Each structure stands twice: as structure tokens, then as C-alpha cells.
Image (cartoon, helix red, strand yellow):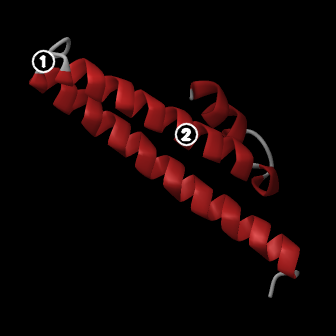
Amino acid sequence: MIEATAQAAFIPRSEKEPWVRLAIRKLDALKILLMVLWETKSLDTKKYAVLSEHLDEIGTLNIEMQKSAHAEHTAKITGGI
């Protein structure tokens, strides 16, 4: 997830979309693993809540980056119309 996010941060906007999608998929997998830890009582509720909140913030940033990259990609394809 970190590698995909870092890669997306340092390449041209028109090339970001695949990297951002990869980061989002990896973040979703991490959220699922975190939920499994919590449901099996391997992680207490307070720690789960704090980690989930941070991951949600990262997810919001990734979604914003994806929207921006998609808009750039669409504009490039349609010729800016």
C-alpha cells in the first residue's frame, strides 16, 4: 500500500490511476485483516477504533486522488471537452 501510494504521488497525474487503484485495494485488504483481528479478540476495541479511523482517513485521501487522476485521464481522452 505504501509503495503504490508513493508511486502515485511522484508520477504524472495521467499515469496515477492504476497505482491509486492498487493502493485502494491494498488498503481494503488491510481493513479486512484488521477486522479479523478484532473479531477474533486479538485486537481490543479501542486499538481497533483508532486504527480504523486512521485507515479511513487514508482511504478518503486515496479516493480523492483517484477522482483527480480519473478526471485528468478522462480529459486527456476526450481532448479536454
Q: Is residue 47 above or below residue 76?
A: above
Image quadrant in which you'd find residue 25:
top right
Kind of residue at badge 2? Arg
Q: Where does the image place residue 28, in percent across and percent down from the top left?
A: 45, 38
Q: Where does the image place residue 77, in percent across and percent down from the top left?
A: 86, 73
- Image mark for residue 69: none
Q: How many marks?
A: 2
Q: Where does the image place residue 34, in percent across and percent down from the top left?
A: 31, 25
Q: Is residue 28 above or below residue 48?
A: below
- Image mark for residue 44: 1
Quarter of the figure that contains the C terminus: bottom right
Are circles 1 and 2 on residues that touch, CB within 8 Å? Answer: no
Tell me the CA gap for discs 1 and 2: 25 Å
Kind of residue at badge 1? Asp
Q: Is residue 66 above or below residue 70?
A: above
Q: Where does the image place residue 57, in percent across and percent down from the top left?
A: 36, 44
Quarter of the figure that contains the N terminus: top right
Q: Tell me which residue sits at (37%, 33%) in the image.
A: 31
Q: Secondary structure at mark 1?
A: loop
* Image side of residue 71 versus residue 32, left or right: right
Which residue in the protein does label 2 denote?
25
* Image side of residue 2 versus residue 81, left or right: left
Few, some or many C-alpha atoms within 10 Å of disc 1 (few <14, some 14-19, many ≥20)? Answer: few
Q: Secondary structure at mark 2?
A: helix
Few, some or many C-alpha atoms within 10 Å of disc 2 (few <14, some 14-19, many ≥20)? Answer: some
Q: Tell me which residue sits at (68%, 64%) in the image.
A: 70
Q: Tell me which residue sits at (57%, 26%) in the image.
A: 2
The residue at the far top in this view is: 42
